[in-house]
Image: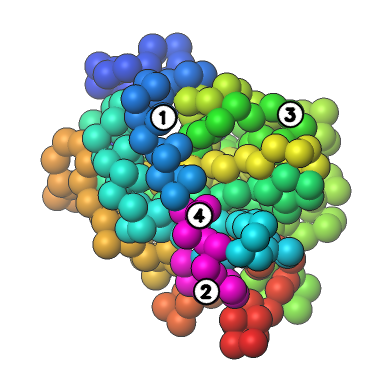
């Protein structure tokens, strides 16, 4: 769907001004969107995942462990596909007010694509470098967006999402390095051109939701505070957006319709999109890729 098509539908939970702001800037912050009952459920599921990680000794396709992780002191970077791991996460993604908010931004027919639970652990949790999401998982159009839910309060010192307003309307960047290897971020020369004074950082209280378009440039600083920052991320699209590469975080719920009706026609946006590597042989995490870690070797060891 085009922005004009989407805006022609009556909103469910957002105001028309909020929707127009999203299309103008490429992101929106919805403070305290998530009711306390849902927040309590996903918070418990998150705490259960951290507890379970004590038994994990090395990173794999589900668990991405931060440096220093141990059974006595767990440090996670990511739980991949949490919706597959715990039914409470899927219930939240598919049944809560989140789906209604996304329908206001991509149109009444909404598909789920993938999920991840990113942890910026306290005392140096990794920076996420400037990047654009769509090149990780190209679609036929640019309605895909990612909703990040703050499970606990997130202040500026914890490395909240930072976005570059309006960048979704500019060209996509090359996310391969000089050796032709996929690193999932802008090269040093391109990143140096970004004026940090133009960045907007989306901190917020627990239950707040950030939504950014798949073309929007975004980044988050390392978490040097003494408080971890778990961020639950769910990616959705309009039903008429069709992926044409392997889903790097393949889920049993991939392409599940969470609102509206299935599409009978695919919508094709003529703007080009960079092709990522073939993820069918496995995927690590954005942290490992941007740090250029040899995850497969680490897993084997």
Does residue 287 sit above or below 146 in this rendering?
below
Outermost front residue: 72
Foreground residue among 165 and 140: 165
Q: Secondary structure at mark 1?
A: helix
Q: Could you classify mark 1 by the number of other residues whose Cα lies within 10 Å: few (under 14), some (14-19), or many (20 or more)?
A: many
Q: Secondary structure at mark 4?
A: helix
Does residue 215 sit above or below 77 in this rendering?
above
Labelled disc at residue 60: 2
Closer to the camera: disc 3 or disc 1?
1
Does residue 242 sit above or below 148 in this rendering?
below
Residue under label 4, please give it.
Answer: 51
Residue 177 image offset from top left, x and y in percent: 74, 70
Closer to the camera: disc 1 or disc 4?
4
Name the side, left or right, on which 23 lies relative to 193: left
Badge 3 or badge 2: first in the primary sequence = 2
Closer to the camera: disc 4 or disc 2?
4
Does residue 129 sit above or below 32 in this rendering?
below
Residue 192 image offset from top left, x and y in percent: 85, 48
User: CA separation, marks 1 and 4?
Assistant: 18 Å
Q: How many marks?
A: 4
Q: Residue at x 81, y 34 (%)?
A: 196
The answer to whether residue 21 is seen in the rendering is: no
Badge 3 or badge 1: first in the primary sequence = 1
User: CA separation, marks 3 and 2?
Assistant: 30 Å
Q: Which residues are magenta?
A: 49-62
Q: Could you classify mark 2 by the number of other residues whose Cα lies within 10 Å: few (under 14), some (14-19), or many (20 or more)?
A: many
Labelled disc at residue 156: 3
Residue 167 quadrant: top right
Badge 2 or badge 1: first in the primary sequence = 1
Q: Residue at x 46, y 53 (%)?
A: 49
Residue under label 1, please give it.
Answer: 39
């Amino acid at each position: 769907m085009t922005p004009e098509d989407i805006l022609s539908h009556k909103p469910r939970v957002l105001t028309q001004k909020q929707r127009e702001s999203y299309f103008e800037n490429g992101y929106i912050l919805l403070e305290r969107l998530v009711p306390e009952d849902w927040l309590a459920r996903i918070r418990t599921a998150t705490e259960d995942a951290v507890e379970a990680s004590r038994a994990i000794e090395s990173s794999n396709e589900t668990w991405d462990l931060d440096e220093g992780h141990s059974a006595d002191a767990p440090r996670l970077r990511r739980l991949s596909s949490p919706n597959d791991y715990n039914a409470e996460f899927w219930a939240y993604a598919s049944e809560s007010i989140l789906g209604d908010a996304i329908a206001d931004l991509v149109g009444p027919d909404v598909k789920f694509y993938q999920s991840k639970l990113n942890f910026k652990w306290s005392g140096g949790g990794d920076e996420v470098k400037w990047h654009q999401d769509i090149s990780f998982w190209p679609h036929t159009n640019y309605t895909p967006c990612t909703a990040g839910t703050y499970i606990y309060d997130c202040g500026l010192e914890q490395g909240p999402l930072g976005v570059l307003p309006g960048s979704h309307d500019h060209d996509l960047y090359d996310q391969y390095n000089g050796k032709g290897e996929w690193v999932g971020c802008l090269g040093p020369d391109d990143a140096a051109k970004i004026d940090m004074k133009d960045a907007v950082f989306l901190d917020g209280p627990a239950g707040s939701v950030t939504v950014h378009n798949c073309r929007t440039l975004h980044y988050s600083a390392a978490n040097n505070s003494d408080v971890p920052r778990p961020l639950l991320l769910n990616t959705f699209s309009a039903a008429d957006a069709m992926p044409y590469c392997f889903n790097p975080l393949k889920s049993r719920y991939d392409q599940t319709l969470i609102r509206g009706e299935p599409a009978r026609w695919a919508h094709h946006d003529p703007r080009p999109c960079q092709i990522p590597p073939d993820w069918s042989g496995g995927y690590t995490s954005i942290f490992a890729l941007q740090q250029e870690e040899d995850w497969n070797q680490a897993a084997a060891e």
